[in-house]
Image (cartoon, helix red, strand yellow):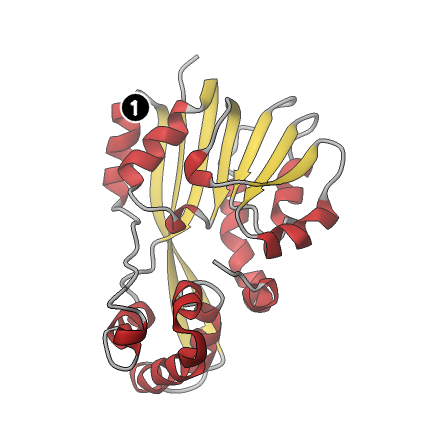
């Protein structure tokens, strides 16, 4: 997908809050082999690396646009690579992912696969949006099923692959993980109005739709704006954003 780093960063401070909650779950030890899946523009990967003294940290992302920005944050012990999080290879002491795994399908298989790449004693730390029940997400799917968008998309609609928190706990238990922690947290955001919510999802949820819609992109945005103005009236608007956080360890 062609990501726009500038659009993504329009709500940078709000998007960063869950990162620090995830970082707080990391068992900080020196000399770790670390991979950050979906590293994006690299600022937060740099902060992760700074918190892990003597570690070798690799930021992995599929977006050339994001990696171009991330390159400015590379240093000794921190590098960035083009790669698919769903095809992770190697053995790692810490597999970290902040707001990226929801772009990969089949989380039953994905979480198991990632766990298999942990070294003995290694830790899995993941944060991902679980806000797919929010009205903005429902309106996006509804609008994609209307013309002229339905034909332009050839009927394609993206549903979130994110599971319920108890399902992640079960997957990790079945893997034999220890110290399993899975929870959902609501991050309260106060935005100017409903159009600001559309701006927010234009940097994330709507990206794969834009890739397929071409010249209909602006019309698609306008249709979502019209509906969301009715659903989220007033100014400012409260935007409660749910996220799933999990941590688990492979036994030594």
Q: Is residue 177 above or below residue 162?
A: above
Residue drawn where x is 30% and y is 67% of the image = 134
Q: Is residue 193 above or below residue 204?
A: below
Lateral position of residue 180 relative to residue 93, left or right: left
* Whole-percent x, y for residue 98 in the image: 49, 46
Lateral position of residue 1 relative to residue 6, left or right: left
Q: Residue 139, located in which quarter of the rendered image? A: bottom left
Could you tell me which secondary element the residue under label 1 belongs to? helix
- In depth, the one of 7 and 16 nearer the eye is 7
Quadrant of the image containing the C terminus: top left
* Whole-percent x, y for residue 213 in the image: 39, 73
Residue drawn where x is 34% and y is 43% of the image = 183
User: Local crowd at mark 1 within 10 Å, few (<14), some, or many (≥20)?
Assistant: some
* Whole-percent x, y for residue 222 in the image: 40, 85
Q: Is residue 177 above or below residue 126?
A: above
Q: Residue 233, located in which quarter of the rendered image? A: bottom left
Across the whole image, how many numbered discs are drawn on residues? Answer: 1
* Whole-percent x, y for residue 96 in the image: 50, 37
Lateral position of residue 116 relative to residue 135, left or right: right
Residue drawn where x is 41% and y is 46% of the image = 101
Residue drawn where x is 38% and y is 65% of the image = 240
The furthest residue to the top: 252
Q: Residue 173, located in which quarter of the rendered image? A: top left
- In depth, the one of 228 and 101 nearer the eye is 101
Q: Please say whether residue 90 is visible from this viewpoint.
A: yes
Q: Please say whether residue 139 is visible from this viewpoint.
A: no
Which residue is disc 1 drawn over?
175
């Amino acid at each position: 997908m062609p990501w726009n780093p500038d659009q993504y960063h329009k709500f940078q401070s709000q998007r960063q809050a869950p990162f620090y909650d995830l970082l707080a779950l990391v068992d900080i030890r020196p000399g770790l082999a670390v991979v950050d899946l979906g590293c994006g523009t690299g600022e937060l990967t740099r902060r992760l690396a700074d918190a892990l003294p003597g570690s070798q940290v690799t930021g992995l992302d599929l977006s050339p646009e994001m990696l171009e920005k991330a390159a400015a944050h590379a240093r000794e012990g921190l590098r960035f690579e083009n790669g698919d999080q769903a095809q992770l290879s190697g053995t790692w002491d810490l597999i970290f992912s902040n707001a990226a795994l929801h772009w990969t399908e089949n989380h039953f298989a994905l979480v198991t696969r990632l766990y298999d790449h942990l070294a003995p004693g290694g830790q899995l730390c993941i944060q991902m949006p679980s806000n797919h029940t929010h009205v903005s997400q429902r309106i996006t799917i509804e609008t994609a099923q209307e013309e002229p968008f339905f034909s332009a998309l050839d009927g394609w609609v993206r549903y979130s692959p994110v599971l319920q928190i108890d399902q992640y706990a079960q997957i990790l238990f079945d893997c034999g993980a220890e110290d399993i922690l899975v929870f959902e947290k609501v991050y309260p955001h106060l935005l100017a109005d409903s159009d600001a919510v559309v701006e927010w999802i234009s940097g994330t949820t709507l990206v794969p739709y834009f890739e397929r819609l071409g010249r209909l992109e602006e019309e698609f945005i306008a249709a979502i704006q019209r509906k969301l103005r009715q659903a989220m009236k007033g100014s400012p608007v409260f935007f409660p954003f749910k996220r799933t956080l999990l941590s688990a360890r492979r036994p030594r």
